[in-house]
Image (spheres, grey):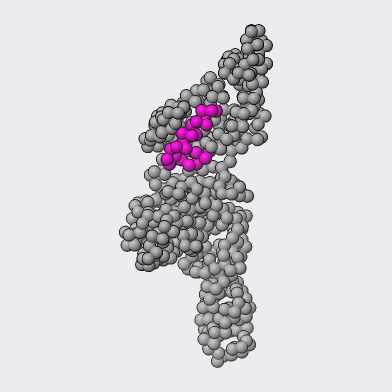
Amino acid sequence: MKSISDYTSSTSAMELYTFLAEAVVEERIQSFSTLMEWVAPLPRDARFNAVIPRIFKLIRKLHWGFFRDIDPETYPKIWKEVVIPHKELKQFGDLKRNLTISDVYVGILDLHGYTRFCEKNKNNLSMLQMLDDIIQVDLFNIAKSYNVVFQRRQGDEMVLVGASACDVLAVTLLIIDTFAKRRTFNVKEQANHRTGYKIILEEMHVSAGIAGGKKFTPFIITKDGDLSGGVINTAARLQGRANELSGSHSMILVSRTVYTNFTNEMKNAPHPFFVKTPIKFFDSGWISFKGISVAVHEVLYTEQDMQKLLYEAQMTDLYRAIEGGLWKDGIYISLLSLLSKVLRTMPKLKIEVTEQGSLRCLTNEDIIKFIQDTLSTFRITQDYRKALKNLETLVEYLDAIPRFDRLCLEYAHSITQEYRKILSRYEARIDTKIEEKVPTVLPAKYRTLYEEGRRGAEIYQKLQERLYQTLTPLEISLLWSSVIDSLQQHLDVSIHSGKK
């Protein structure tokens, strides 16, 4: 056959297949709709029915890229979302190229320890092949069993696409469990994914980000079948954020839309995996990435992770205080209450700090006591200068604690940075107020000393402190409030990830 018009009743199915296959390989036919235009004059006979499915499969393999392996039987959910069925043959169709649909979820996963494993076993090809088989075969089959499309990229990066938040999250957890030395969760039915290779494979951690399920967020399938758009970018940034927060153990971060849709899916039709494997979510607030800001939740799936729920209420109080701009007291009090609660939930610890040239050993109880005294200084004695300087010291203590909650520490640093602005302006107002009191508070001889004291710091400081003690609680409160009011629009607590 040189053209479709050469087709006759004596043309074999092989001849027809060869003709159409060449057109697909040469990219004269790149879509199923184009194929159907070519074969429109042909009778719908046995030859037609034998050849068209095979040519469609060839089109899929060559032009569908990420989705080259999907079909309506194996991946019914994702097929429904990303394929436009042909009006005549609905079991075939064309891949959507630019869509904004709510029921597509993308997971980006990064395998920690992959490079180290490859370097360690560079002369042991069987070990490298074993790891490759686990990723290419085992993980692919795990994903397929949950209607999720799996693709490996750049050695240690994996991409998941599914039509259900529950499905993508279940596959992510099973991938984490595959590379964990100990069972991550107790689900006997899932044990079959842990092959004999697991006995000799060293432990690796996974950082994962999952996004999607949001209307009007672009999900673009490029001409060569690659993925692009806002959903992909958000998932990638969440994965990077998870990597920042935890380089030593696996972590999953999801967008708030994924969390909400997961909850709704479980209410409407409980997912079999999560019926037997309950998980929790921890509100991680809003994270600013380059160009976007995303509300984030951390997935809690181990007993150790669940400890975070003990201070979730305090974390939520801090978010509300920040949202309300409560710099006069709410943000400070909420932050210290949160840090105190985190310390109470942590195992016993000891850190060494240097203070005034000497070494000091601090425990959980010591730091909690310091926080309580600092709160008293802030709330009762209203010595805001000392309270803010104590906050600086407290953050230094926390920096010295291994494995202190990274998110809480980031908020502590960000808030302390803003309070530095407040302290600078507040001390300037205090100095002005003290100057106003010199003529009325200090006797004549002391006024002379005060003026001379400007040239002698020690005397000056003592006299200034004496003047400071005469400030009434009302005066201090008014000064503090006026500083906050003047800076309110310039204060901002935002947690950034990646490049700004």
Magenta-drawn stretch, dominant element (helix, strand or loop)? helix
**345 lies above or below 100:** above
Q: Position of residue 309 (x, y in %)?
A: 44, 40
| Residue 389 included in the magenta stretch of the image | yes
Corner quadrant of residue 481: top right
Q: Nearer the viewer, residue 490 or 44?
A: 490
Q: Residue at x 57, y 18 (%)?
A: 458
Query: Is residue 445 rendered to the left or right of residue 267?
Result: right
Q: Position of residue 182 (x, y in %)?
A: 34, 52
Please say whether residue 348 is visible from this viewpoint. yes
Nearest the camera: 455 or 161?
A: 455
Residue at image location 52% in from the left, 86% down from the top: 14
Residue 319: image quadrant is: top right
Relative to 434, residue 216 above or below: below
Can you give x and y, in whole percent of width and height, for residue 454 in the image? 63, 18
The range drawn in magenta is: 388-411
Tell me which residue sits at (62%, 86%) in the image. Answer: 3
Q: Is residue 299 magenta?
A: no
